[in-house]
Each structure stands twice: as C-alpha cells, then as structure tokens.
Image (cartoon, rainbow, N blue to C red):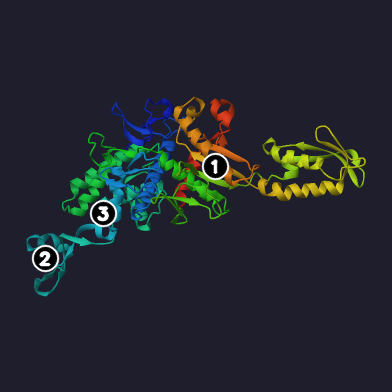
Amino acid sequence: MFNFKTLKLTKRCDSESTNSFVGIRRNTNGEVEFRLPHGFDDFPENDFDATKDLFFKMYRTFKKFERDSTREIVDPRSNGKDQIQKEKDGYRFKNKEDNDVVLYSKIALIENLLEVYRDLALDQMERRIGADEKVDYSKIDRYLDRAIYLDKHVIYIDEMDLPRQTLRYESTTLIDLFCFIVSELQNELEQDIEPRVQELAHRFSEQHLSHEESLFNEETFETTIRTLKGVLDDINKRTAYKDEDYWRLYEAIETFLYGELDMDNPHELGTFWGISNFSSIWEDMCATWSFINHYRSGGILYADTNIKFNNQYVANTYYNKNVKIYKHVNFEDPFCIQFRGKKRWMRPDLIYLSPDGGKQLFDDVMKIIIHDGGDHGLTVDFDVKLIDKNWKGIYTMFCSNLKKSKFLRGGMRVLKDNSFKNYSKTELEKQKKLIQNTQGSQILASMIYLLDWKYMDKNCFIENNEKVQRDLIKQLCYEFTLRKVTTSFTKIENNFVIPWFFTQDLEKKLDDNVGEHIDDKILNSRLQYNGVRVSKMNFLEIQQIYLTHD
C-alpha cells in the first residue's frame, strides 16, 4: 500500500501533459503519481489526510461510474455508452462527443482483498487443528494427564488433538489480520462493517497493535504496515496446513501490504487506476447535482444525460434511435437547425428554470418613488427608477404604457427621466396590474440557466483558445434557438461550468444556481462580448452529492 504522505501529486498547472487522465500511474521517471483533476491547483501538498480522503472518494467515484455505465449494457439503446467493451484493464466506450474513454477500474491491492471478502464466508474460512475421536497409540504417553483411570489399571482417552480440517465460528490469526485490513478499508470507503468483522479486527488490534495504531493514520501508517508484515510472515512460517482458502487470504493480504501498482506489465490488471477521459465523470457528477436541486420543483427543462436518479434512469426521449435525453413534458424542444430539407439536432448539457432570488417587479427590478408631499389624494407625483438593468425591457415597456395612457389630461403631465406629476392613482394601479399580469409575475418568478459542463482549465477561457471559440459558437446557437420558446423579456444566463477545488478558508456552499463566477473582466473578449459566463463549481461538494445519491 502506498503512503499517502509521499505519494507524488501531479496538478494540471505543473504538468506538461494535456491529456485528461485522472488517477494513479507511473510517470516517465518511474514514480507513482496521483494525477489530479482540473481546478485542483490549490490542493495541499504532502497532506496525508487530504490526499487519503481524495483517493478514497475518487475510488468510490470510479466504482459508481463503472456500475452505472456497465448497467446500461442491458439496454442496447443506452445513452452514449452503447459501445462498452469489457477489457482486461477495465472498460472502453465512446462518450457522447464520440471520444474514446477507458475506465481502468482495477487497483489490485484493494480489489483482490475485497473480492476475497465477498466470496468467502467467515465461518467457512476459519480452520484449525481440532480435536479428533481417533486415538494414535504411538502418542498415548502424551495424554496420560488427560486420561480417565478405570479399574484394573485401564485408562480411557476419548479424544486427541490430531491434524484434521474442521470448521468453527472462531478466528485464527490470519482471519483476524484479514478482518482488520478489511474493516480499515471499509471505514475509509464509508461502507457498513459487519459486526463479526469488527469483532475479529478489534481482537487483532488488541493482540498486535497499540491503542493509537491505525492503518490509515498519518503518524502510525508506517509502523502499522511494518507490524502487519511481520505478523503475516510469522503466520506463514507457523502454519502447517495450507489449503486453497488459506492461499487466497494470504495472497490478498500480501498484495495489499507489499503492492503498489504494477506499471511494468501494461497488459496486467491494475496497471493503471483511473480514467482516460474524466469529462465523462464530470458531466455525470454535475447532472446529478442538477437533478438533486431542481428536478422535484419541475425546474429542469432539458438535460443531455441518462444518469440514475431515484433508482431509475432519467432519460425519457430518444434522439437518433440510440441516444437518450431528458426533456420536461411541457418543454418544446427547439434545438434543431434545418438546412436544405435536412434537420440537424443539437444537445445542450442542461437547461433549468430557477427562482431568481425571489425578485419582485416593483421592488427588486424597478421602484415607484413618490415625491415628498406628492400624494394629493386622487393623484400622485412619482418617479419610476430602474433597479436591475437586466430587466430594462420590462421597465421601458411599463414607462411607455404610463405615458400612452388615455387618462393623461388636466394637470397630469410627464416630466423628463420618467417622472410623473398629478398622475391618477387609479390609472397607476391599473398599469401596474397590467404589466404584472402580462409579463412581470411570470417572467420574474424564474430565470433560465443554460449550462455546459466543461472539464477544462480556467486559463482556456482567459486565453483565445480555439476549442473555447468552437464551444462558444455552439453555446450561442443553443441560446439563439432557445429564444424561440421564450418571451423577449426572459433572461437567459449562459454558463460554462468548470471543476474547482476550494481551500477550506475559501470554501463556499453552492446555492441553487451555478457556483462562483470567474470575474468576467479577465475572460477573453469573445466571451465578454457575448455575455457567456464561466462558473467554478465546488468539486468536492458535487462529488459528495454524486456518491450519496443513486
């Protein structure tokens, strides 16, 4: 098992490689390295607990992605993963961008141990030298102290301790050692630990370790590993009878204690641990977060995903026979471009309708400010002020309606800067209700978010990156076609969403929207001009949601 304190971390800002592999492998210098996702530039170095926690969460993330992906094999029309091939080193398939993805799901030093635990029941693994009713007369002198003496100098011996294979619900030291490692692993993987495993693990710890020693504790990792190796070696020397179950246990423990990753044999299981194209996992993580936050409220209008949510796949609509997406029952899909009689469908990652901070038309968007002494009973003097410039269209329409009123007569007049004098209170209330009923209450109760999950570094959006330019064109096409099914006053916020590691002092809980925006002023000019924002999402928070919801 590798030491998390000395495990080499490779961050994207320090790496010359541009591929999107995330996981553990050997680098060109022969060092075992843990290649971190994009956005982890501030991840702490040489921090045992932080590296350990991330490793086990990534292990659980890969296993969940593997389960969800391979489960879709049973559906020949599955979303984007319909070309899954099982290989010696994991799974290979095409993602929705038609890019090759290889999931290296094996990490032998853990997998072998847990596989043995799943396959063998404890009461069938535990074997010992047991009592036998047969009597070996050549050894009878060794049992005189345990004999029953009868008349006429006759002795009776009912049983002897002879080598034979027996089953019993009591542990040997090998089983204790095995259960100790399994319990330590399951604790880090946040799995339930069987009471029997806990019992045997506790007994091993009491007999061989000090109270403070633990397998995944920074201060005791090396001494604990050393002790476990010594116990395993002693067991192997003292055990006379070694059957198939013994060797399965022994080899699993040995691999865990002495193994790292076998990088010298590229065709062996466990050569790599990770995924060649992490964007596939990032998209599933973000989609899960979105459904957790917005599905129950009916806010998700469209999602290019088929993740599992509430124990069933969310996709309900087919594209091109074998690609499935989610579409709200009341959402009219506009993402089609027709050219020369042929249709080309586009698939944005996610569109959802979200409450816009509870904005009120005549409070957060614009205000009617009555002049001092301006209330004259039936008439009033007031100004109309725009508060939120994002809703200038509604503000302009309301002021225009006030000015066009047929009741402007007598002392009622319009001054500059949308200031009104001696205006009929009845007419003012009528115009307020009119704008609220036709535009305000429906539009301001919600905002449309158009999101594109991007597994990329933030610098790509600051520089004039060619890929970002292509992605921007697609995103603007999405927004353009979306306008077909929205009113002219509906606000659409267009976002690229990237992963980000927030240090503890800067960590923020995600709200119901899209995380923390990168300062628009530092983005490249094309993004600024077209109003497309870039948002940093809290990777660890989204990952936790992904892991705890199926």
Nearest the viewer among 299 and 417 is: 417
Q: Is residue 519 visible?
A: no
Q: CA distance from mark 1 to mark 2?
A: 90 Å
Q: Is residue 69 above or below residue 492?
A: below
Dot 2 surroundings within 10 Å: few (below 14), some, or many (20 or more)? some
In-front residue for pair 482/226: 482
N-term-proximal mark, 1 vs 2: 2
> In this orientation, which residue lies closer to the viewer: 185 or 380?
380
Residue drawn 67% across the image and 49% down it: 442
How much space separates mark 3 and mark 1, taking CA atoms? Answer: 69 Å
- Asked where in the image residue 397 lies, by quadrant, the reply is top right
Left or right of 55, for residue 353: right
Q: Residue at the spot x=17%, y=63% of the render?
A: 145
Residue 172 is marked as: 3
The picture places residue 55, in percent across and down from the top left corner, at 39, 40
- Residue 430 circle label: none
